[in-house]
Image: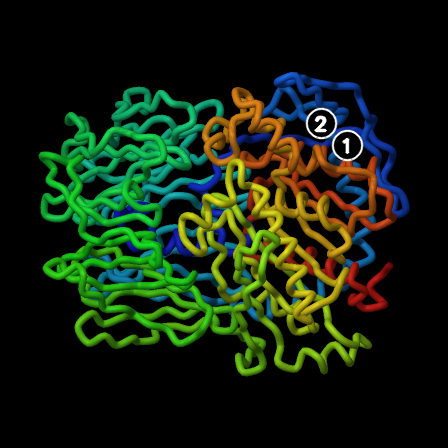
Amino acid sequence: MIRPTSTTALAWALAATTFAATTFAAPAVAETREDSAQVTTSAASTAAAPATAAKPPVAAKKPHTYSVHGITVEDPYDWLYDKSYPKVDDTEVLDHLKAENAYFEAKMGGQAAFTEALFTEMRARIKEDDSTVPQKDGDYLYWSEFEEGAQYRKHYRKPVAGGEAQLLIDENELAKGLEYFRLGAASISKNGRYLAYSTDTNGSERYTARIKDLQTGELLPDVIENLRSDLVWVKGDTALVYGPSTEEWRTLETKLHVIGTPTSEDVTLYKEEDQSFSVGAGLTAQEDWLVIATGDNETSEVRLVPANDPTAAPILVKPRQKGVEYSVDVRDGELWVLSNDEHINFRLAKASLKAPAEWQTVIAGSDEFYLTGFDLFKDFFVTEGRLNGLDQIQLRQYAEPGKITPITFPEPSYTAGLSNNPEYDMTKLRLAYQSMVTPSTVYDYDVKTGKLETLKTQEIPSGYDPKLYVSERVTITARDGTQVPVSVLMRKDRAEILKKQGIEGPGPLHLYAYGAYGYAVPPGFSTSRLSLVDRGFAYAIAHIRGGDDLGRRWYLQGKLFERTNTFNDFVDAGRGLIANGYTAEGMVTASGGSAGGELMGAVINQDPAQYGAVVAHVPFVDVVNTMLNEKLPLTPGEWQEWGNPITDKAAFAYMLSYSPYDQVTAKAYPPLLVTAGLNDPRVTYWEPAKWVARLRELKTDDNLLLLKTNMGAGHGGQSGRWNSLKETAEEFAFILWQMGMAPKSGGE
């Protein structure tokens, strides 16, 4: 399958580490809600009562109604949406957000010592001077390192034949003086001389690309602004292919930049007319074809052009057909295709480049095995997928594709897959493996002998004994009879830990899920969650519909007019865990972000009594208004996921029935921590702000409700490994505090 970024080992290492601390977000391809804003401080709030430790700010209510399909909706907090967006300069809006931040600081200030203690505890589990395992790509070995105390990585290479290490990128230097920094694409030219890379300095996910001459260390004068894609070297390393952003943060073009020429002269290789589609590009396994792919959440279309002649007439593989997804690769002039055209769980096929639409099945689709991807190598190919929800890696021979050599793992619940394999001619495959009990492990798999060699196991400096923990995979029956799997992590001595804290019987349980875009939350390892588990929490991941954990149908049963299955599965998973003795009513804590934040809003509307505390990160809660606003970056491309309420009355009514913001009513809600990013291009800041305002107005309880808006960051929260970890400590401090498990000296 086409490599997700450029094929250099540096790019693979970068892909493996980007957003590593952000556990709530699905891959960027799943969502593309985009925008940017930079603001300065302003005067005290005129729209909110002053925030004090005792009293939260109250947002003004301003009459605003709209009617769609004969249905009238009142939206008194519409004013929090700055209509000059993406510029946010409305003083009243900014002052309200600052008032909420002041209230957050006032309330969490009493937990500052506890938060710092949790942060110190979490940081002690992280090896500060850590590095990735070097991987060969051509004449060089590539790796990245964290230095002790550093927020960001340094990226290196050295010749395979021997010699000094060369510093390629120092993210710490690039981030100096910036409130936010994120390294995006990174691609080294095939001849090894040039490094193209991109950076985001405000969280808006609009990147700026530069090119570094690795022989001289100098930056070339070329600067590509407003980038939202990978950087792909073509034309004998003389040009880059990239995807610019529109004003609405959509990637509708693939452009060619010839090194040393003005970007105004860049050539458009392909332009998409459908505003709901997004365009991307990459290279095939042998790097001889440039793949230009366009698509939305359910339909795709692919074109091929020679990498050495990117302005040649493209080969259209197969015209788009609604509901048909496909991806391609090329080996020795033969086209390979992964598609759901004949089976919901995808098949693998081949075709001639002379007749690229005539696909001949290599591996048929299966009800049992969900085929998620394939990779072509010189002497073999690899298929990846899931069987009963568990990751599978299978080696196959070109001459006998039906003969499978599986790579097996011993644990009942885990996540595993191909890692950094940048070369076409590989004799050892780099694999990544972890489970909820087993720390992240890097293997090399010898293709000839079938032996696994452990190259690195995640080191936990403060100590970790896996024998103290148990991981279980349980099945909960949802209200419609569907069997929903849940992965659970606990201490074996949990009862004793709880007893020391005066808690008899079932203890607290933290439940996490995402449930959208076909993204399966992996049952992987986390050092930070040990701060809950070691205090007697059980930690559970609900593999609910909306993800593709149990196959493509599992995903489809959680979208469009079946969206509420996702919310019901989560509520029922919690209820089932209570019934099975893992926890008790009111002792379930929960968290989710983005579409998972929508999940949090929906489940506390449905069953608030179940939860003792809830954290909603950048929550997509104003569903109806966002899906009605086709000017927003995400909206056109998301109608296939959620429905189009503009043209479809039934979609509008259904969406309105579950939209968390629209379904807030006068009742008791659990303690709630909500986060937002002013520069967030995926979930715009006003969604959580409006939701919190309506909750403050209508809820009948005295439980704590906090809103924290990062004024200089976006969807993933703060950048830098320690800044990000501090936010996790803040989240856990809130949860433990609200569950009565914070130190008495910690404040309120």
Outermost residue toward the front? 481
Query: Is the residue under label 2 in contact with that under label 1 (CB below 8 Å)?
Result: yes
Q: For the residue marked with disc 1, what is the amino acid?
A: His
Q: Which residue is mark 1?
A: 96
Mark 2 is surrounded, within 10 Å at the Cα level, by few (under 14), some (14 to 19) or many (20 or more) other residues, namely many
Residue 723, given in percent of the width and then of the height, sits at 61, 53
**Position of 136 compared to 543: left or right?**
left
Please give the name of the residue rendered at 30% of the width and 52% of the height, measured from the top-left corner: 373
Q: Name the kind of residue labelled 2 in the image.
A: Leu
Is residue 221 visible in the rendered image? The answer is: no
Q: Nearer the viewer, residue 577 or 45?
A: 577
Give x and y (percent) for residue 380: 16, 60
Residue identifier under label 2: 80
Q: Is residue 72 visible?
A: yes
**Going 75% across and 41% down the picture, which residue do you hit?**
101
Q: Identify the mark nearer the N-term, 1 or 2.
A: 2
Rendered position, 88 above or below 486: above
Q: Dot 1 lies on which element?
A: helix
Q: Residue 550 occupies which quadrant of the picture? A: bottom left
Q: Nearer the viewer, residue 164 or 541?
A: 541
In screen coordinates, is 598 left or right of 337? right
Residue at 68% x, 44% y is: 601
- Check disc 2 and report its element: helix, strand or loop: helix
